[in-house]
């Protein structure tokens, strides 16, 4: 773990997509008998969050990682953001830059975007790896309670946060290094993994021009297809890696829903929180390597 913690960041490049600069990194040699990997970060993170994984996986695969539009070192235009937008970004990156079907691995928000690619752009996906993936199922819609106090408070809160000043104040609060560290300690079981470097990797992009507008856009983001709808469209191999100490989701319950709609998947429940790839990278890297070699078409 210590060696991976000190692994240097790989210098990346920029790809022009729809008039925006998109940052990505690439490591490892192309293998004729193995598909490349594309690593997709979660909300507020970036390619830096995959540093420990790239350091080991590049020994066996050609590895790519990308900053979604609005995050990391990628452009942060003032526009609508959605899972569909990032799906199109990933698909076009695979088509134009990687140039062959790819195993997508996504954490949280990045997992949902990767799932959209595997379901809606199957020609781009040789396989899919989801790590504590975001997104609801159709039967997990909140019950409508027009007169319920929680429903009223939720609507009022959302309406308030759509206003410029409250949104600005909330953004300024959550981007403080002390708050970032506190949040990470809530979602990582191993607090030793919450390093100064990790905090800085998340803080730094929040200083970019447009970062506040991207944050505000989250509250206006249109809902995409539900997970069960996407799984019904998908046919590629699926590996689920759950950090079961995640306080943001009931992983066992959500895992059961995935099995209901995609019973042929492979899954592991691990002693980690919301970001298992960064918290227990050696374990995750081994599972990814063995699964990709065993399950994908070129393995």
Image: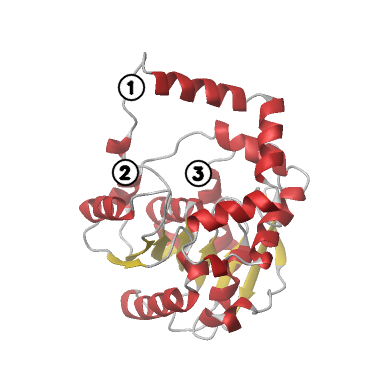
Q: Name above or below for residue 60 compared with residue 23.
A: below
For marks 1 and 2, give the CA distance: 22 Å
Q: Percent from the top left, x then y, of residue 277? A: 48, 68
Q: Secondary structure at mark 3?
A: helix
Q: Percent from the top left, x then y, of residue 148? A: 36, 18
Numbered badge on residue 229: 2
Mark 2, residues whose alpha carbon is within 10 Å: few (<14), some, or many (≥20)?
Answer: some
On-image quarter of the N terminus: bottom right
Instruction: Tell me which residue sits at (50%, 68%) in the image.
Output: 279
Numbered badge on residue 144: 1
Q: Nearer the viewer, mark 3 or mark 1?
A: 1
Horizontally, residue 112 falls left or right of residue 267, namely right
On-image quarter of the C terminus: bottom left
Provide the residue designation for mark 3. Answer: 84
Instruction: Say whether marks 2 and 3 touch (CB < 8 Å).
Output: no
Quarter occupied by residue 99: bottom right
Q: Secondary structure at mark 1?
A: loop
Quarter occupied by residue 48: bottom right
For marks 2 and 3, give the CA distance: 14 Å
Q: Secondary structure at mark 2?
A: helix
């Amino acid at each position: 773990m210590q060696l991976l913690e000190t692994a240097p960041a790989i210098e990346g490049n920029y790809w022009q997509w729809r008039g925006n600069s998109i940052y990505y990194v690439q490591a490892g040699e192309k293998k004729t008998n193995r598909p490349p990997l594309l690593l997709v970060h979660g909300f507020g993170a970036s390619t830096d969050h995959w540093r420990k994984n790239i350091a080991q996986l590049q020994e066996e695969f050609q590895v790519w990682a990308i900053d979604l539009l609005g995050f990391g070192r990628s452009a942060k235009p003032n526009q609508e953001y959605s899972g569909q937008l990032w799906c199109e970004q990933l698909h076009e990156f695979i088509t134009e830059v990687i140039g062959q079907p790819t195993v997508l691995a996504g954490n949280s928000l990045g997992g949902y975007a990767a799932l959209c690619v595997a379901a809606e752009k199957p020609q781009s996906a040789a396989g899919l790896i989801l790590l504590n993936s975001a997104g609801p199922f159709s039967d997990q819609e909140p019950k409508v309670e027009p007169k319920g106090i929680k429903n009223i408070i939720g609507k009022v809160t959302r309406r308030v946060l759509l206003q410029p000043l409250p949104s600005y104040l909330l953004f300024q609060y959550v981007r403080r290094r002390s708050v970032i560290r506190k949040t990470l300690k809530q979602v990582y079981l191993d607090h030793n993994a919450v390093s100064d470097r990790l905090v800085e990797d998340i803080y730094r992009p929040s200083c970019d021009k447009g970062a506040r507008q991207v944050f505000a856009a989250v509250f206006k983001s249109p809902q995409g297809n539900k997970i069960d709808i996407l799984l019904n469209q998908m046919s590629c191999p699926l590996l689920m890696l759950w950090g079961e100490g995640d306080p943001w989701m009931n992983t066992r319950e959500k895992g059961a829903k995935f099995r209901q709609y995609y019973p042929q998947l492979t899954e592991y429940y691990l002693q980690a929180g919301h970001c298992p790839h960064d918290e227990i990278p050696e374990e995750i890297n081994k599972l990814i390597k063995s699964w990709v070699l065993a399950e994908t078409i070129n393995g």
